[in-house]
Image (spheres, coloured by chain):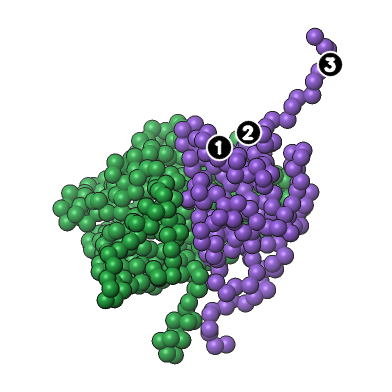
Amino acid sequence: MSDVQEAPQPETLHGSPVSYSRGQKVVHPTRAEYIKLLKKLLDDGYAMCSDLTAVDFLTHPGRELPAGIAAERFEVVLNLTSIASRDRIRVRVQVPESDATIASVFELWPGTEAMEREVFDMFGVSFDGHPDLTRILMPEDWDGHPLRKDYAVGRIPVQFKGANS
Amino acid sequence: MTAVENVRQTNEGAQEMRSRSEIGARELLREVGSVLRMSEAEAAKLGQIPADPDEDQTMIINMGPQHPSTHGVLRLMLELQGETVLRCKPIIGYLHTGMEKTGEELTFLQGGTNVTRMDYLSPLNNELVFSMAVEKLLGIENDIPERAVWMRMLLSELNRMSSHLLFLATNGMDIGAVSMMLYGWREREEVLRFFQKVTGLRMNHNFIRPGGLAADLPAGWRDDVLTILETLPPRLAEYDILMTDQPIWRERLQGVGVITADEALALGTSGPILRSTGVAWDLRRDQPYLRYDEVEFDVIVGTYGDAFDRYAIRLNEIRESIRIVYQILDRMPLGDYRIQNKKVTPPPRARIDESMEALIHHFKIFTEGFKVPEGEVYVGIESPRGEIGCYIVSDGGPKPYRIHMRAPSFVNIQALPHMMRGGLVADAVAVISSVDPVLGEVDR
């Protein structure tokens, strides 16, 4: 028996590091592990995808992430709910600006269809395998993605399509 | 303006439903296949209609955005064959005002005015979930005074009642029971009058704030609540006579817009839609917040997942809310209505007259706001429409770095194409009404 205390291993879930934010459990998969992890979570009973959204960390790059996860500009955030065990889990995955695409989870939770469209519309992150990736809140011919941090507030006056000024 | 120009100017391009000749099995799969876990061939067969060599028997019509039964500016594109709805696609965004972007420009203290306008029929629940998320980020969620917690519960339950009463009104109007509309609005007005007395406003209160509430309950509030609680049960019994027991009402709703538990879960729906399928999922009971674990109430569930179940659930949830409010009246403690934490609470008015520091402190809180430690948090509560969630990322400043509201109507509306498929166009109105969407929070 050695008297050298081993450093506690960082907690992982299905091979992805886990952190806690204000007591809420967060899993940080890489983009490659993303779908694999979600499939396992779905098998674990997280039958409901309550929420899917994204954050643009352009002006706030230095945030805490577990070792091995490199911070990127975009982060796609999923909040999953398990009806059986009555708990929630959050999945945060980093999406780089240079290649802002990630696999769609539509096949796992069809209810994310509108949410992924919203993220595409607002952040310009595209989802591979999404059946109908079009803008959802903004008009189809809109330029830019409003919730990006480099999209200024109040730059464009209220606009009605085709109205004569 | 010619009709062609008119169409071009209101065209939403690829967001719109395309005609059957332009799409393949994939789009049909999107509408049914993935939910039912069908094979692509099966899904395509579902969408097939008897070939008619003479002419195209289907047509696509627009319902809304300016239709009285679409509860605001919801636009549905319906593909019809005769009177049967073959496909349906909701097109939203007509009320999009960028509230999440606006939220990034408002301090945590001002944020309440923004979120309260999202679901304008249950403003207090919006404020509540926002305040709870901010408090969790601040780490003060367990320090909220008891009176504030019970006051929040009181307001939240009364708000549930007013929201469901409005649902009964609009549901009646949509189905053709027009007198119900008057009764529903009348009863809701009683509740709103109480809100006006407490908060100063009928809607959009900004009354529940991070750290507690804006003010204490006014004198005589208990009598006002009791008046509401005593008025409502006989009125609800009248609704039973007017609608629940009425054969026409049942014929109109039963078996309309059916959804199964698996489909409802896969589509992420919550609230009365999920409960109508028999899944007893109510965040008040299953992930208790405030003091819901200390009050007695039943979670109402349905059996068939049809429009009638959703109507009956909401009607009975009003009764459960009445039960909860009686218990709240019994247990309402005395004490502070907001946390006495100098960081988030401005000093009382009297202190400002005698202390320069208090004046500066007051000024700073209202101009700069308070700083919230870095982090991210998601809080979900049960609003009348389902799970309303608030996801906030803070970078340590006085404004949220990112604020996202998980709006129940936004998610629930995805169930519409599924519920309408194969039904009659006349039932489409009943289905929309039974989902009870609020377009303010769909589009945000």
Determine the residue located farthest toward the top in the rendered image.
A1
Please identify the quadrant where the N terminus of chain B is shown.
Answer: bottom left
Q: Secondary structure at mark 2?
A: loop
What residue is shown with label 2?
Answer: A14
Q: Are marks 2 and 1 in contact (CB under 8 Å)?
A: yes
The residue depicted at 41 percent of the width and 49 percent of the height is: B39
Q: Do discs 3 and 2 belong to a common subunit? A: yes
Q: Do discs 2 and 1 belong to a common subunit? A: yes
The residue depicted at 81 percent of the width and 18 percent of the height is: A5
The residue depicted at 48 percent of the width and 60 percent of the height is: B442
Where residue A4 is drawn, which disc sits there? 3
Image location of residue A133, percent across then percent down: 54, 62
Colour displayed for chain A in the image of the structure: purple
The residue depicted at 53 percent of the width and 84 percent of the height is: A163
Which comes sooner in the sequence, label 3 or label 2?
Answer: 3
- Check disc 3 and give the amino acid type: Val
Image location of residue B101, percent across then percent down: 63, 62
User: Relative to residue B399, is residue B64 drawn left or right?
Assistant: left
Seen from the viewer's position, the closer of residues B327 and B96 is: B96
The image quadrant that residue B43 belongs to is bottom left
Where residue A41 is drawn, which disc sits there? 1
